[in-house]
Image: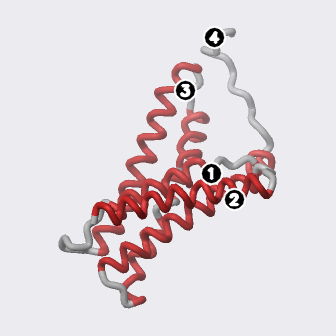
Amino acid sequence: MADGIGAQEPKGPHPAAAAARIDYTGAVYGSLLAASVVVGTDPMEPFSRLHLVLLLLATGVVFWAAHVFARLFGARIAEGTLRGRAIRQDLVAEWPIVKAAVPPALAVAVSPLLGLGPEGTLWLALCVTIAGQVGWATLAAFRANATRRLMLVAGAANLLLGLLIVLLKVALH
């Protein structure tokens, strides 16, 4: 049908071809999101590493669910493709938002082993989020067969965003 309602879903690309076209948007976004959680944490307030770990992970899960909901009820309904397979695809496609929260959460969890206090823990977590953000953006450019120059631009642009977050942290605290 022309309007897409009731039309059959396309079978999709071969799994190997789909793997080659992984979308890293969620991972970059999730890293930025985790950085904002870290920046919003005041080291002068009573500090619990467990609370921050849970906050990082819970924020990733909540934003993952929000993105899936927006995709399903924004685009999928309009396209007429709100079916089980499409729902599963969206759940998986947005999962990198949650995955991006794991490295900074682990950094917070291991920070006592490194002898870090609250402020050092937050800086470590922030550096991990920025490294993730730059890494995911650069990997996305690489996997898209971008030129080296474009990969450098992707990494540099995300590093700049990360440095802006650092400036925000310094200004707020």
Mark 3 vs mark 1, foreground winner is 1
Residue 10 — which label? none
Q: Which amino acid does label 3 sit on?
A: Arg
Which numbered disc, 2 or 3, marks the residue that appears first in the sequence? 3
Residue 51 percent location from the top left of the image: 28, 68
**Residue at label 3?**
76
The reply to whether callout 1 and callout 4 are in contact (CB within 8 Å) is no
Spatial distance from mark 1 to mark 4, Cα to Cα? 30 Å
Q: Does dot 1 land on a helix, a strand or a loop? A: loop
**Residue at label 4?**
3
What is the quadrant of the N terminus in the image? top right
Which numbered disc, 3 or 1, marks the residue that appears first in the sequence? 1
Give the residue displayed 38% in from the left and 57% down from the top: 36
The reply to whether callout 1 and callout 2 are in contact (CB within 8 Å) is yes
- Closest to the observer: 138 or 162? 162
Residue 5 percent location from the top left of the image: 60, 14
The reply to whether callout 2 and callout 4 are in contact (CB within 8 Å) is no
Q: Does dot 3 land on a helix, a strand or a loop? A: helix
Residue 125 percent location from the top left of the image: 43, 71
Q: Is residue 137 above or below residue 51?
A: above
Q: What residue type is labelled 1?
A: Tyr
The reply to whether callout 3 and callout 1 are in contact (CB within 8 Å) is no
Mark 2 vs mark 3, foreground winner is 2
Looking at this rendering, what residue extends furthest in the left direction? 46
Mark 2 vs mark 4, foreground winner is 2
Q: Which amino acid does label 4 sit on?
A: Asp
**Residue at label 1?**
24
What is the quadrant of the C terminus in the image? bottom left
Spatial distance from mark 2 to mark 4, Cα to Cα? 37 Å
Q: What residue type is labelled 2?
A: Leu
**Residue at label 2?**
139
